[in-house]
Amino acid sequence: MKEKKAGRIIILIAFVVIICLSNVIRLFAGKIVDTTSRENRTPAKKPEMTADSYGTFSSDYTSYYNDNLPFRNNLITLNSAIDYFCFGRPSSDHVAIGTDNWLFYTKKDDGDPIGCYQGTNLFTEDQLNAITQNCMEMRDLIESQGKEFVILIVPNKERIYSEYMPERYGKPADNYGALQIYDHLKTNTDLRVIYPYDELMAAKEQVSENIWYKTDTHWNMIGAYAGASSLMKELGIEMPSLNSNTVTIKTGEETSGDLADMLSLHKQLLFADRQYTVEGYDMHDLKCSGKGFDNMINYHATGADPRSIYIIRDSFATQMADYIGSQFSDTFLRYAASYSYDELLRCDPDIVVYETAERYADRLRRFSIQQ
């Protein structure tokens, strides 16, 4: 009993010394302390002791201290690096480690990308009918105003680069949600819907570079070019292919993406990815006014197609923005969560596109143009 008690005392003293020492070290090494918040939440603020907060002050201060622990991010990164590089396991439940440093998103309640890949979250016939009905209603409203309406569904990374997926997930399913929607809309309606899986797989063969980031959920500028080209073709505009003599791909700096951030390995995985730019298509003296994820992205291109286009988008259209903007007189891109019908009416475009990633395709059942 005495030995156990002595051991506990030693551990307690060691813990106190480490905590106190870390604060002292931070005073002299503040510049090397990583205090950037990479979690999708607001860190706890330092609470004040008042008569009203007396009962919760202890727990509130504990939360504050945990979020502001000296060297917290450095320790998290160290632990994540040991997990990743020594044991080949992720420090996040939402990331799967594939081969050759390919990372994949696995969060079930954020579109269930693994369910999409394995075809375990298929739509019922009633759900497909509801999606079809809603899409038809959107199209009819847009066409009643003399505008064109197109749906673009961007394939998931897991499907495009299935060869790097962890073996435990098996091969990609032949039947899956996005394909169900595409087939149902093409079979039962005359809607214009694009699911550029074949075009993206062809693009993989045309270039030696990756068309998706290894450490991010999104395609890179090469994949986005192939996706934008598919949309342009549907709208009567031919972009030069990636393997044409006019197109060049330039390699930029090392980079890492959102999946690396989830593992707290942003700097440690920079070696896995590169930035790319695609050049050699007509940019029509492109001008951009306004950028930002939630804000309107607006382009004007001189001498381009005289039509204007409005894209209700998610994050995948960000990489496509320059390509699309260069091909139309005026281009408006609006994040779906901040979209308003009044704005659409003010822009008065000739073409309206609803773009969504495969894992969010179910939103086609609920989204309303008139919201």
Image (cartoon, rainbow, N blue to C red):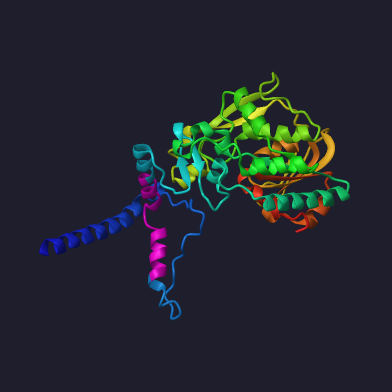
| Residue 338 visible in this rendered orientation of the protein | yes
Write the residue at 26% across / 60% down. 16
- Up/down of 21 relative to 192, above or below: below
| Residue 295 visible in this rendered orientation of the protein | no
Using the rendered view, name the quadrant where residue 307 is placed: top right
Image quadrant holding the C terminus, namely: bottom right
Left/right of residue 58 with respect to residue 150 in the rendered view:
left
Left/right of residue 97 with respect to residue 311 in the rendered view:
left
Write the residue at 48% across / 45% down. 261
> Residue 216 location, x and y as percent?
53, 40
Which residue of the protein is positioned furthest toward the bottom in this rendering?
Answer: 51
* Range drawn in magenta: 59-79
- Up/down of 358 relative to 276, above or below: below
> Residue 191 location, x and y as percent?
79, 43
Q: Nearer the viewer, residue 135 or 267?
A: 135
> Residue 215 location, x and y as percent?
50, 38
How many circles with numbers are drawn on the protein? 0
Which residue of the protein is positioned furthest toward the front in this rendering?
Answer: 125
Q: Which of 49 and 11 is in front in this view?
A: 11
Dominant secondary structure, magenta: helix
Q: Nearer the viewer, residue 26 or 196?
A: 196
Report if residue 127 lies within the magenta region: no
Report if residue 69 lies within the magenta region: yes
Left/right of residue 64 with respect to residue 251 in the rendered view:
left
- Up/down of 72 relative to 357, above or below: below
Image quadrant holding the N terminus, namely: bottom left
Using the rendered view, name the quadrant where residue 206 is placed: top right
Write the residue at 66% across / 43% down. 180
Which residue of the protein is positioned furthest toward the top in this rendering?
Answer: 245
